Amino acid sequence: MKKKDVLTVKNLSKIYSKNNSEPVNALNNLNLDVKQGEIFGLLGPNGAGKSTFINILGGTVIKSKGNVNVWGYDLDKDPRQVRASLGIVPQEVNLDPFFNPRRLLELHAGMYGIKKKDRITDEILKLVSLENNADSYARSLSGGMKRRLLIAKALVHKPPILILDEPTAGVDVELRRNLWENVKLLNKIGVTIILTTHYLIEAEEMCDRIGILSKGDLVALDTTKNLINKIQTKNVTFIINEKTKIANIPLKSLKILSQEDNRITLSYEKNSLKIDEIISYFSDKNINILDITTDDANIEDVYTSLIKN
Ligand code: ADP
Ligand code: MG
């Protein structure tokens, strides 16, 4: 069954113009869609336009051009319905230090007009692993806990789509893991996730599909798997029984990167050469292979090559 699109963006542009400064093209003709139930990652360096995109969805930035549809609602015609379908966790942590998590969530639910009996405060606190801190002042919470409280706040109206803008910026490694576990859990119970990050490894680990933004342009949009497959160059290291220097291996696209004692590292292009051909070459020369390790490409390589061009 084909998955339903829960967000479609057509030709979306944003130009920030202030009277006495140069206009900034923050988004240029952005086209993308997000499917129900997926974790979609928007990647890009600082200034790429990630927050602009999210703030347009959240209604704090007004688009210059284009169409946005969220959960079947058009942003221009039904902005309230769009907002009701989204839970947005902003990049900046803005919490009143004198509220505790339970009180904050209750107040927020009140703002959405959710009746006391329909509130799911305890359930949400559990979802973000804050049930034991429900009554502590926000100012006494750790950085990671504050982030999770912001997620909780975005969930009070049970939105089907949760958007996180750089949720792990400034959060240490262990808390980051913990935060991702919470996000994965939410996804498992059916929440579609859209996140932005510049931690590439995380995007690779978390996301089903990835869009890469560079200076307001979407330079890639594909499944994480396909993006990684686009990288053609592979590195491979052989441990051989031979200590003599191998000067040249006459195979298409093959380069010798280094050789130290019996360890030789090569690179080759996946579409020109198969690893079997390298192995056959060694066996034809009576060189025994004791071990092979390959070094697969990751999103970082895709990202670097796309952003550079
Ligand atoms: P990211 O979140 O990817 O770091 P942003 O969306 O914050 O990127 O910024 C994209 C571009 O728009 C940057 O060049 C930034 O300086 C500019 N920008 C962002 N907000 C404003 C604003 N309120 N006024 C003018 N320019 C802005
Ligand atoms: Mg940002």
Image (spheres, grey):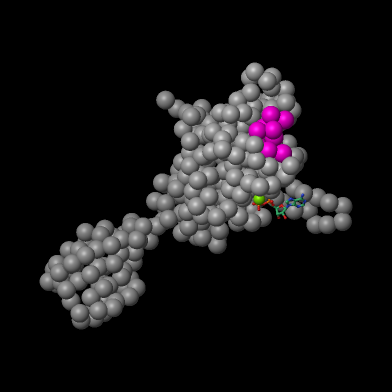
Of 153 and 14, the residue lying toward us: 153
Residue 64 appears in which quarter of the rendering? top right
* Quadrant in the picture for the N terminus: top left
Eyeballing the image, is 40 above or below 215? above
Left or right of 22 in this view: 189? left
Q: Main secondary structure of the magenta part?
A: helix
Residue 122 appears in which quarter of the rendering? top right
The image position of residue 18, as x and y in percent, is 84, 51
The image position of residue 74, as x and y in percent, is 67, 28
Question: Is 300 inside the magenta-drawn segment?
Answer: no
Left or right of 181 in this view: 121? right
Of 111 and 190, the residue lying toward us: 111
The image position of residue 125, as x and y in percent, is 58, 34
Residue shown at 66%/55% (left/top)?
Answer: 47
Residue shown at 41%/46% (left/top)?
Answer: 225
Residue shown at 68%/43% (left/top)?
Answer: 138
- The range drawn in magenta is 99-107
The image position of residue 5, as x and y in percent, is 54, 30
Residue 280 appears in view: yes
